[in-house]
Structure formats: C-alpha cells, structure tokens
Image (cartoon, rainbow, N blue to C red):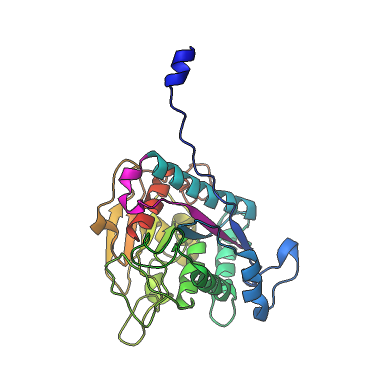
Amino acid sequence: MTTLRKRLKPAPRTLRLTPPAEIDLDEQGHLKGPAGGPTVQVARVPEHLARRLVIPAGTTDIHVYVHGWQTPPAQATRTAVRLLEQAVKLYESAPDRYPGLKSGYRPWCVVVRWPSSSLPGKRGYERIRDRAHAMSSDGQGHAPYIIGHLLGYLDSERTDPLGPTVLANRTGQYLHLMGHSFGGRFLCEAVQRAAEQPPVLGWSTPYDPRRPFTVDSMLIFQMAAPRDAFLRHFDTLFPTATHPGAPVRGPIALTHSRWDRATGFWHLRAEKAPGIGHSGAGAAPVPQFSTRLLPTETDYPRQVLDHRLVNIDADWLYRGSRLHPSGAHSDFLRPESAHLLLTLAERSR
C-alpha cells in the first residue's frame, strides 16, 4: 500500500477563482449603493466603480455577465461563477486544445444584477420585457449608461498580467461580455455607448482608429429580443459609411434552441413572432454565419466563429424540462457552453 501511494501522482489543483464583483441596478437602471443604500448619483458613478472594481493581480481575462428573466441576484452570481469554473476546468484538463491560451487562463468576473423576477407566463414575461426596455431605452433607462461606464472603466484599468512580452498584440487583459435573455439587450445597448480607449488584436475585423477601445467577444445565451433586433434596435453596433460602429472587435455569438419556450411560446404571444433565443437572429445589417454548439472534445474551426454575428444552434443540448414554463431558456449552464466561452477567449489572442 505504501509503495502504491508513492507511485500515485497528486491530482492537479484547479485554479480557485477570485470572488466576482457585483454591480446592482434598480428598476430604472440606476446604480444601487452598497448594502441596499440609496442609488449612486450620476456624478459619483466613476468614484463608486473605482472603489468596487479592483482587477485581481494576474488576471488574464475579464468577463462581464448580465443575467436574464427570473434570476434572483444570488443565482446570477452563482451562474457566472459556475460558467467560469467550468471553463477553467476544461482548460486545465486539456490545455493543448486551446493553444492560444499558452500564457494561461485566469478569469475574473463582474456580475451586473437587476430586478428580473416576475410571475411565470405571458404577463410575467411582458412585465420584465417592458422593464428591460424601460431600463435601457434612450432618454429614460439608465442601465446602458452604467454598463457602458463600467466597460470604459474596466478598459482603462486593464494591465498586462505577466509582462510586456506575454500578450503580443495588446497591453492588457482581454474583455469579454456574457449575457442571458434580456441581459443581452442591456449589453448591446451599453456597447453602443461604451467608452473609447486602446486597440485589440486577433479577429479578422479591421481595426478602426475611430474606435480604439474594444470588447474582444460577446456571447449571449438565449437572447430575449425580436429576431430583427440587430436591424431595428441595435443599428449602431456595426459600422456604416456614416458612423464607426460599437467597439466590438470579436464576434457576437448567439445561442438558440427550439426548446426555449420563453423566447418561443411566450415571446410569440407577446411579440407575435419568436425571439432570437428560439430561432436565432433574422434580418441584420451584416452577414451572419450559422453553426452548431459543439461537444467539449470537438474544436471549433477558426472560420466558424470569425464573423460579426454567429448563430449557434443548441437544440441537441439545451432542452430544459417539459414541466418548466420557460423550457430550455435557462438550460445553458453546461460544460459545452463553457467550451464555447473558452474558445472565444482563446481566439481573441
């Protein structure tokens, strides 16, 4: 027994994540103070963020997560942490599968939380849809201002985690956005207003000197928005002859599943058409590419993800419960989702 014990190699230790930062918004999208205190005045938002958001030393990737419908605050944090834990576990179990992460993957997360709970069913869906719209609508909602300011702050604070020779094409950590359901709306609105600062790398999209600040990737699970939202609501995300577009260098990846009843059945009743989370994006101002969510042991070919908009069919995996009113809407907390997240981080190098 003693000899056997000597021969056994100790199990590799999984990186322990630094606890995420939590940013809480009220029903108008205003930044809430600590411990349930009064909302933070607009003029004090930068000061508040500077106190709350200290990027941990050694961080390679910053992920900002905005949750969706029927998600209590504590659950939103658990979901974001679990996704990153799965991503770290995948990387540490097979680092050769992600060669772009040769310098390691040490993520940190900022979780943006907002009041999204309602009764199940059509009325509940409509109530949160209307709230999400009010929180992000131009001239009324404050959420895009706060999230945009958050992104600008994180960008200005990005530093090289291991020295100037490690990250070949930029001087700091990589910045990725993750959203679920209505949280994807907030992110799209916010990126359109985000602050501007230094250039990034890797994707084939040309660098635009008018938009030096960049988000390296966006991943939205089961987006609760009309299929033509990128044409009607997010028309400044992409560059045109008259404006430079939002500071997004990498792809916007959108998962969808026909088993998602929230963006299928309930969205159909509320909007007279299914949503992106059910059927993928429809009309858009840029070319799209469609592919499948892949198992963890299968690599994504580079050309599959290197597009402005990527629709990712997750029918085979995101199925949820027949008994749950929203079906597969929240059934994305899986290793395959983390594999996609990790691949987007790797391809941003």
Nearest the camera: 166 or 142? Answer: 166
Query: Which residue appears at 32% of the width and 40% of the height?
Result: 297
Magenta stretch contains residue 104: yes
- Residue 136 lies, in percent from the top left, at 55, 73
Tell whether 262 sits left or right of 36: left
The vertical placement of 83 against 185, above or below, is above
- Residue 211 lies, in percent from the top left, at 39, 79
Task: Say if residue 261 shows up in the picture.
Answer: yes
Task: Say if residue 257 shows up in the picture.
Answer: no
Query: Which residue appears at 37% of the width and 61% of the height?
Result: 167
- Residue 232 lies, in percent from the top left, at 40, 76
- Residue 320 lies, in percent from the top left, at 47, 44
Quadrant in which the C terminus appears: bottom left
How many badges with numbers are in the image? Answer: 0
The vertical placement of 114 against 3, above or below, is below
Magenta stretch contains residue 165: no
Magenta-highlighted residues: 94-114
State the residue lying farthest toward the top: 1
| Residue 345 sits in quarter | bottom left
The vertical placement of 249 against 266, above or below, is below
Nearest the camera: 250 or 224? Answer: 250
Nearest the camera: 70 or 103? Answer: 103
| Residue 25 sits in quarter | bottom right
